[in-house]
C-alpha cells in the first residue's frame, strides 16, 4: 500500500500547486478593473456567448406561457453545434421527483435511455447519444468532467439527484477547443448546479409513489449577507424505492453546499461541495425461461442464501463526492477563470449472482474448491462462490481559462487560452469469496494469486492546453477556429491482473493527440441563427489496453471522430425550433487482435454515423404548447456496411404542455424508440439481437397556489409514468446454441418497467 500512498501524496501535491495558482490570482485583486461580479460556480447555459447561450431566458426565467418557458428542451441562438437545453421549470414541473440526470435528458434529440428498475433503479440506464454509449461521451458538473478513470463510464444513481440541478444541456458534438473532457468523441451532457440568489428563500418537497417510492428534499438560500455580500445555497435530498424489479431496492442520500463570495468589484470566488451515499440490490436482466416462470418484473435475485442469486450477496453501496473552489476575475481587461477541484468514488459491491444459468432459481454454480498455500485443497461442496468488487478513485485537477476581447475593426473578436490538468489514481481489487460462510479465499488460506479475481493499481495524468479565437468580422457573424493538444499518460501496477486472475502486469502508456476545430454562428436577426461545425473529437484510451501480456506490442492511436454538422435555430415567444444534420467519421476504432500472450490492440475499422435531428415547441399564448423532437439515425460499420450496435433507427418525443403560472398545469408526453441491434450490431445470420421499437407515455398534472400566508407558493403534483403499461424489451444480451438457435437460458432481456404513479407536494418560502 506504500506505493499507493505515494500516488495519493503526488495527487495532493498537484492539488496544492493548483490552489497556489488561485491564490496568486487573488493577490491581483487590488489591480482589477471595475466589472460586475459573476458567479462561476455553475455554467449558465443561457449566457450570451457562442459557447452555448441564448439572449432570452428559458424555463422560470422566461415569460410565463411562452415557448421558451414551456419547451421540454431547446437550442440556444448562439449554438455552435447541435444542443438541447432542459430548463429548471421542466425538471421541477414535469419529471418524476426521483429523476436522475438520465431521466432529465430522455426527451432531447438523439438521446436514448432505459430504466428497467424505474427512475431510481440504480445504475443500468443504457444512456447513449447518437449511438455512442456510456464511456464515449462526457458528463460534467459545473464544467468539471467526472467518470471512472479506467473506462470513463458513469453511475447515474451514485451522483447528483435531479433536485440539485438547475439546467442540463446536451451537446451533440465535440464543442470548441476549450471544451474539456475525456470523451469529446461523442458529445457532452453538462449538469449545472442552481444559481445562488440575492433574496432569502428555500423549498421543501416530498413525494410518494408506486413501488413504495418516496422522496424528501429541502433547500435553503441565504440571499445576500451584508456587509460581506456572501450568498449561499444548501440542498438535501433523500430518495428510496423498492424498485420496479423484485429485490430492486434502492436508496440515495445527497447533500450539497455552495457559497459565492465577491472580492472587490470584479472578482467572485465560488466554493461547492457535494456528497452522495447510494445503495441498490443488483437486480439484473432475465432469460426467456425466467420471464415465463416469474414474469417481467423478476430481477434475477431470490431469498435463498444457498444460491448465488441470494439478494444479500448481490448489491452495490457507493459513495461519491465532488468539491471545487473557483475564481473569476477581470484584470486589465483580461478575464481569468480558474477552478481547482476533486472528485472521488468508492464502490463496495458483493457479486455472486449467476446471471442466467440452467437453473432459473440460481441454484447453479454451487461448490468451492481451490489449492491452499500450506498444501492440500479447500473443498466445500455447499459453498456459494462469488467475489467482492471494490473500487476507489480520486481525481484532482485544475481548469484555467484566460480570455481577452479585441476591438480591431474587421479583426475584432475574443482570444481564449485554456489549460486543463488532472491527476487520478484508482485501486480495483476483487477478493474471491465463499458467501454463505462470509469468508475470503485469503482467510481460508488460498494460494495468493487464487485469492483475487484481480488486484490492480493505476494512475493517470491528463494535460490539455487549448487556444481559440472567436473572430467577429461583421455584426452577427462569429467564426471560431481552435487548436487543442492532448497528452494522456497511464501507469498500471497490477499484482493480480484483471484478465481472469492473470499474472502481474506493470506497464505505462503515453498517448498524444492534436485536434483542430472550427465553428461558425451567424445571427440573421434577433430570432434566428445558423451554425456550422467541423471538428475532431477525442476518446482517451481505456486502462484495459495495458492489461495484455505484452502491452509494448500495442500499436494504436487514441480514437477520434471527424464531425461535420450544420444547423438552424429559431426562437420567439411563440416558437422554439431547431434542426440539424450531421456526419461523423469514426475510422480508427481500437480493437483487440489475437489472444493469450499474442493479444494486442490496434486501430482498425470504425463506424460512419449520419442523421437529421430537430425539436420544436409552439405556444398558443394561453399557457398551452405542443412540442415534438426527434432524430433519424444511421450508423454503419465501415468494414461490413452493417448497422452498428446501440443505434436506434429513430428517436422521437411528442406531446402537450399546459402552464400559465396561475394554477393548473399539466403535460402529456409520448416517447418513441426505434429498433436497434445490441452486442456487436447487425448480423448476416440472424436477428436475435434486434430490439423492436417501443413507446411509453407519461402524464403529469397539478395545481400551483400563490400568496399563502407564511410561504411564497405551494404545488401539488400527480403523475403516471408509462400510463399504457407497455412492457416491451428495451435491450438484450444474446447467447446462441451450437446449432445457431437462441439459448433460452443464457440470453437475457430488460423490459420497460410497469405503470408508475406518484403524488408530490412542494412549498417555496
Image: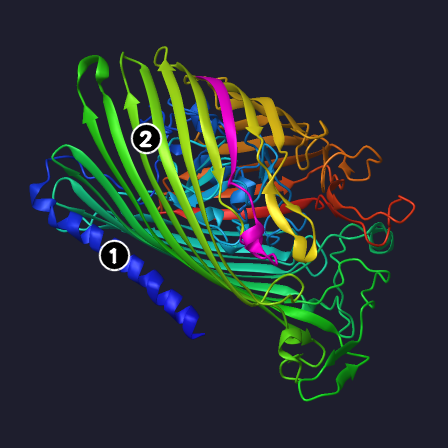
**Highlighted range, magenta:** 543-569
The residue sitting at the left extreme is: 30
Q: Nearer the viewer, mark 2 or mark 1?
A: 1
**Dot 2 or dot 1, earlier in sequence:** 1
Image mark for residue 47:
2
498 horizontally vs 298: left or right = left
Whether 370 is drawn above or below 202: the answer is below
575 horizontally vs 501: left or right = left
Q: Residue at x 50, y 31 (%)?
A: 172
Q: Position of residue 154 (x, y in %)?
A: 53, 50
Task: Describe the element under mark 1 as helix, strand or loop.
Answer: helix
Magenta span includes 167: no
The residue sitting at the right extreme is: 739
Q: Answer yes or no: is residue 199 visible.
A: no
Q: Nearer the viewer, residue 205 or 431?
A: 431
User: Would you say the residues marked 2 and 1 are in contact, meaning their CB atoms lie under 8 Å apart?
Assistant: no
Q: Position of residue 271 (x, y in %)?
A: 28, 52
Q: Quadrant of the N terminus?
A: bottom left
Real-space Cα separation, disc 2 to disc 1, in angstroms: 31 Å
Image mark for residue 17:
1
Q: Nearer the viewer, residue 504 or 544?
A: 504
Task: Describe the element under mark 2 as helix, strand or loop.
Answer: loop
Q: Answer yes or no: is residue 329 visible.
A: yes
Amino acid at each position: 500500500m506504500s506505493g499507493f500512498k505515494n500516488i495519493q501524496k503526488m495527487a495532493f501535491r498537484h492539488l496544492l500547486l493548483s490552489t497556489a495558482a488561485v491564490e496568486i490570482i487573488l493577490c491581483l485583486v487590488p489591480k482589477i478593473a471595475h466589472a460586475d461580479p459573476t458567479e462561476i460556480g455553475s455554467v449558465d447555459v443561457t449566457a450570451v456567448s457562442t459557447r452555448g447561450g441564448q439572449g432570452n431566458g428559458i424555463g422560470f426565467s422566461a415569460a410565463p406561457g411562452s415557448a421558451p418557458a414551456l419547451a421540454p428542451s431547446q437550442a440556444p441562438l448562439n449554438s455552435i453545434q447541435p444542443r438541447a437545453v432542459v430548463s429548471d421549470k421542466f425538471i421541477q414541473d414535469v419529471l418524476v421527483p426521483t429523476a436522475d440526470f438520465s431521466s432529465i435528458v430522455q426527451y432531447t434529440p438523439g438521446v436514448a435511455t432505459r430504466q428497467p428498475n424505474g427512475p431510481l433503479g440504480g445504475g443500468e440506464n443504457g444512456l447513449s447519444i447518437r449511438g455512442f454509449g456510456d464511456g464515449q461521451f462526457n458528463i460534467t458538473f459545473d464544467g468539471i468532467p467526472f467518470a471512472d478513470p479506467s473506462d470513463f463510464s458513469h453511475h447515474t444513481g451514485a451522483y447528483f439527484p435531479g433536485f440539485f440541478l438547475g439546467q442540463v444541456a446536451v451537446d451533440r458534438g465535440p464543442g470548441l477547443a476549450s471544451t474539456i473532457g475525456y470523451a469529446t468523441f461523442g458529445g457532452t451532457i453538462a449538469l449545472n448546479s442552481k444559481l445562488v440568489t440575492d433574496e432569502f428563500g428555500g423549498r421543501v418537497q416530498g413525494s410518494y409513489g408506486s413501488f413504495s417510492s418516496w422522496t424528501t428534499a429541502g433547500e435553503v438560500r441565504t440571499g445576500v449577507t451584508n456587509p460581506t455580500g456572501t450568498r449561499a445555497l444548501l440542498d438535501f435530498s433523500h430518495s428510496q424505492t423498492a424498485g420496479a424489479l423484485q429485490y430492486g431496492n434502492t436508496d440515495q442520500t445527497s447533500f450539497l453546499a455552495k457559497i459565492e463570495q465577491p472580492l472587490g468589484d470584479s472578482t467572485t470566488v465560488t466554493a461547492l461541495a457535494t456528497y452522495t451515499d447510494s445503495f441498490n440490490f443488483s437486480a439484473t436482466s432475465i432469460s426467456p425461461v425466467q420471464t415465463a416462470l416469474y414474469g417481467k418484473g423478476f430481477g434475477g435475485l431470490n431469498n435463498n442464501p444457498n444460491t448465488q442469486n441470494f439478494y444479500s450477496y448481490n448489491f452495490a453501496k457507493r459513495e461519491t463526492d465532488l468539491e471545487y473552489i473557483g475564481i473569476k476575475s477581470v484584470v486589465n481587461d483580461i478575464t481569468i477563470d480558474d477552478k481547482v477541484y476533486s472528485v472521488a468514488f468508492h464502490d463496495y459491491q458483493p457479486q455472486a449472482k449467476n446471471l442466467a444459468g440452467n437453473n432459473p432459481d440460481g441454484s447453479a454454480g454451487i461448490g468451492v474448491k481451490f489449492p491452499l498455500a500450506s498444501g492440500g485443497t479447500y473443498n466445500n461442496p455447499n459453498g456459494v462462490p462469488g467475489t467482492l468488487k471494490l473500487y476507489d478513485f480520486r481525481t484532482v485537477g485544475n481548469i484555467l481559462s484566460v480570455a481577452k476581447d479585441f476591438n480591431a475593426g474587421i479583426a475584432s473578436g475574443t482570444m481564449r487560452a485554456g489549460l486543463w490538468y488532472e491527476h487520478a489514481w484508482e485501486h480495483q481489487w476483487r477478493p474471491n469469496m465463499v458467501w454463505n460462510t462470509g469468508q475470503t479465499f485469503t482467510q481460508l488460506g488460498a494460494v495468493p494469486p487464487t485469492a483475487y479475481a484481480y488486484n490492480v493499481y493505476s494512475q493517470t495524468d491528463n494535460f490539455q492546453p487549448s487556444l481559440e479565437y472567436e473572430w467577429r468580422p461583421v455584426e452577427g457573424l462569429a467564426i471560431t477556429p481552435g487548436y487543442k493538444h492532448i497528452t494522456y499518460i497511464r501507469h498500471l501496477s497490477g499484482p493480480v491482473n484483471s484478465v481472469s486472475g492473470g499474472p502481474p502486469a506493470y506497464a505505462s502508456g503515453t498517448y498524444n493527440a492534436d485536434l483542430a476545430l472550427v465553428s461558425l454562428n451567424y445571427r440573421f436577426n434577433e430570432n434566428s441563427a445558423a451554425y456550422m461545425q467541423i471538428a475532431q473529437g477525442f476518446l482517451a484510451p481505456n486502462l484495459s489496453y495495458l492489461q495484455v501480456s505484452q502491452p509494448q506490442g500495442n500499436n494504436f492511436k487514441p480514437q477520434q471522430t471527424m464531425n461535420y454538422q450544420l444547423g438552424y435555430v429559431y426562437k420567439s415567444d411563440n416558437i422554439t425550433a431547431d434542426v440539424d444534420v450531421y456526419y461523423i467519421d469514426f475510422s480508427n476504432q481500437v480493437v483487440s487482435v489475437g489472444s493469450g500472450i499474442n493479444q494486442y490492440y490496434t486501430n482498425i475499422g470504425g463506424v460512419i454515423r449520419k442523421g437529421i435531428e430537430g425539436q420544436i415547441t409552439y405556444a398558443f399564448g394561453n399557457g398551452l404548447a405542443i412540442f415534438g423532437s426527434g432524430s433519424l439515425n444511421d450508423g454503419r460499420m465501415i468494414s461490413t456496411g452493417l448497422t452498428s450496435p446501440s443505434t436506434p433507427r429513430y428517436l422521437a418525443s411528442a406531446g402537450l404542455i399546459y402552464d400559465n403560472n396561475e394554477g393548473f398545469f399539466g403535460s402529456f408526453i409520448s416517447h418513441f424508440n426505434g429498433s436497434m441491434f445490441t452486442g456487436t450490431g447487425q448480423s448476416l445470420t440472424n436477428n436475435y439481437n434486434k430490439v423492436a421499437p417501443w413507446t411509453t407515455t407519461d402524464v403529469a398534472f397539478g395545481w400551483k397556489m400563490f400568496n399563502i400566508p407564511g410561504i411564497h407558493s405551494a404545488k401539488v403534483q400527480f403523475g403516471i409514468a408509462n400510463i399504457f403499461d407497455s412492457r416491451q424489451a428495451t435491450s438484450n444480451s444474446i447467447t446462441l446454441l451450437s446449432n445457431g438457435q437462441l439459448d433460452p437460458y443464457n440470453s437475457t432481456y430488460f423490459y420497460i418497467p410497469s405503470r408508475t404513479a406518484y403524488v408530490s407536494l412542494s412549498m417555496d418560502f
